[in-house]
Image (cartoon, rainbow, N blue to C red):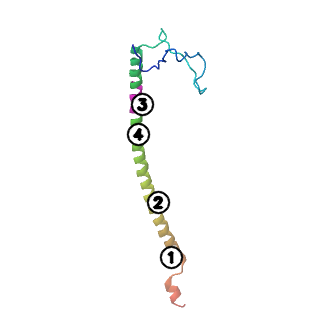
Amino acid sequence: MQFPYIAIEKRDGRHPPPITGTSDARGTLPIVPHTFGTASRTLSQIENDKHELEIQMMDRVGNLESAILNSASSYGRFEADKRYIETQKIRYEREVRKLKSESEQLRSPPLSSVLLPM
C-alpha cells in the first residue's frame, strides 16, 4: 500500500537511516523517521479530515463573501452620506455668502443719503 502524502525514505543500503532528533544536512529541519504502526493515520481518517477541512474552508469563504457584501453596502451608504454632506456644505456656503452680502448692504449708508446733500 502506498501513501502519496507521506515521504518514504529509501532504505537500499546506500543511505543510512536517519537518527531521531538530529537535523538535516543544512541543520535546519529535525528528522523524524516515518512509522506505519498504530500511531499512523488511516486513509479514512485522512479523508474525514479532508472533508472537515473542506467544510471549514467553505464556511470561511461564505463568511468572507457576506463580509464583502456588507462592506460594499456600507461603502455605498458612506458614499451617499458623503454626497449629501458635500451638497449641504455648498448650500450653507451659498447661504453664508448671501447673509454676508445682506449684512454689508445693511452696514453701508443708503445711496440716497450719499448722493443728496442735506
- Residue 93 vertical placement versus 45 (above, below): below
Q: How far is mark 2 from mark 4, CA to CA?
A: 31 Å
Task: Please give the range of residues in magenta.
Answer: 55-63
| Identity, as a three-letter code, of the amino acid under mark 3 | Arg
Q: On the image, which quarter does residue 91 sit in? A: bottom left
Among numbered discs 3 and 1, the one appearing first in the sequence: 3
Considering only vertical position in the picture, is 105 above or below 47?
below
Q: Residue lying farthest top?
A: 38
Q: Marks 1/2: CA distance?
A: 24 Å
Label 2, on which residue? 89
Residue lying at 47% horizontally and 69% vertically, measured from the top left: 98
Predominant SS of the magenta segment = helix
Q: Which mark is in front, 3 or 1?
A: 3
- On residue 68, the disc is 4
Q: Nearer the viewer, mark 4 or mark 3?
A: 3
Q: CA distance from mark 3 to mark 2?
A: 42 Å
Residue 28 badge: none
What is the C-alpha distance between the residues marked 4 and 3?
12 Å
Q: How many other residues sit within 10 Å of disc 4, few (<14), some (14-19) or many (≥20)? A: few
Check residue 60 in the rendering and tell me which mark sits there, or answer none.
3
Question: Badges 1 and 2: C-beta atoms under 8 Å apart?
Answer: no
- Indicate the position of residue 111 as horizontal and vertical percent values: 50, 84
**Which mark is in front, 3 or 2?**
3
- The quarter of the image holding the N terminus is top left
Tell me whether the residue at label 3 lies in contact with that at label 1, contact meaning CB atoms closer than 8 angstroms: no
What's the residue type where badge 1 is placed? Gln
Asked which secondary structure carries label 3, the reply is: helix
Badge 2 element: helix
Q: Give the mark, 4 or 1, whose residue is nearer the N terminus.
A: 4
| Closer to the camera in the image, 93 or 102 | 93
